[in-house]
Image: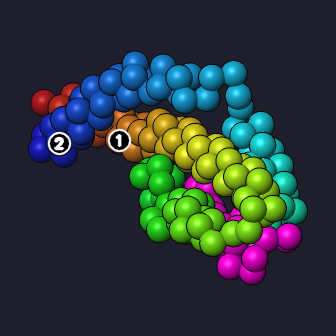
């Protein structure tokens, strides 16, 4: 009785959570992605990486290293916990945008134009990275619910079937 009751509570509570998530998250996913797909976002990030690295090659070493580090170390959804959170702690892309703000103050007038273009690309890239992480967060939260709810629902059915059979046999 206790096992079936505990499983029933878990299934009902997770069912309410699942109902809530499937009502809210698809709309949020659509708002986040718009007409883009995750693949197209990743492609746009790769294009921004390539363009930013090309521009950074003619900039001072500090700027070049900052851009290269951001392009190399930024990850999108490597682990389950990172996917569920929707962000990367100490994100290299966000750090690069912050660092570029400081590094751009001591440039020559010729480099300023390239710097502004590079900074715009890195800000756009950061926005794309955040959108991709947000999409993965929504998808992983919907998926994790299924991985938890379905096994508990099956366990509840097995426990209730065993209980019903036991009542018929021993009654």
Q: Residue 152's mark? A: 1
Snapshot quadrant of residue 111:
bottom right
Q: Residue 84's mark? A: none
- The answer to whether 160 is drawn above or below residue 136 in the figure is above
Q: Secondary structure at mark 2?
A: helix
Snapshot quadrant of residue 65:
bottom right
Could you tell me which residue is drawn at 24 percent across and 39 percent down? 10
* Residue 42 image offset from top left, x and y in percent: 74, 46
* Residue 38 image offset from top left, x and y in percent: 69, 38
Could you tell me which residue is drawn at 75 percent across and 80 percent down? 61
- The CA distance from mark 1 to mark 2 is 10 Å
Could you tell me which residue is drawn at 42 percent across and 52 percent down? 85
Q: Is residue 149 visible?
A: yes
Q: Which residue is mark 2?
A: 6
Q: What's drawn in magenta, residue-wise?
A: 57-79
In the rendered image, residue 50 lying in the magenta stretch gets the answer no
Residue lying at the far bottom in this picture: please name it: 61
* Residue 60 image offset from top left, x and y in percent: 75, 77
Between 132 and 94, which is closer to the camera in this rendering? 94
Going by the image, does 6 lie left or right of 31? left
Q: Is residue 165 visible?
A: no
For the residue carrying disc 1, how many other residues have a C-alpha within 10 Å: few (<14), some (14-19), or many (20+)?
some
Mark toward the start of the polypeptide (1 vs 2): 2
Going by the image, does 107 lie left or right of 100? right
């Amino acid at each position: 009785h206790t096992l079936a009751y505990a499983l029933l509570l878990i299934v009902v509570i997770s069912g309410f959570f699942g109902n809530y998530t499937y009502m809210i998250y698809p709309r949020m996913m659509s708002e986040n992605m718009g007409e883009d797909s995750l693949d197209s976002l990743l492609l746009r990030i790769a294009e921004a990486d390539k363009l930013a690295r090309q521009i950074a090659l003619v900039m001072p070493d500090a700027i070049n290293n900052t851009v290269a580090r951001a392009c190399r170390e930024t990850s999108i959804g490597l682990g389950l916990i990172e996917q569920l959170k929707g962000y990367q702690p100490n994100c290299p892309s966000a750090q690069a945008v912050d660092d570029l703000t400081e590094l751009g103050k001591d440039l020559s007038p010729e480099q300023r134009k390239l710097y502004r273009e590079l900074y715009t690309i890195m800000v756009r890239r950061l926005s794309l990275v955040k959108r991709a992480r947000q999409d993965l967060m929504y998808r992983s939260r919907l998926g994790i619910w299924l991985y938890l709810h379905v096994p508990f629902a099956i366990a509840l059915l097995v426990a209730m079937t065993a209980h019903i059979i036991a009542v018929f046999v021993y009654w």
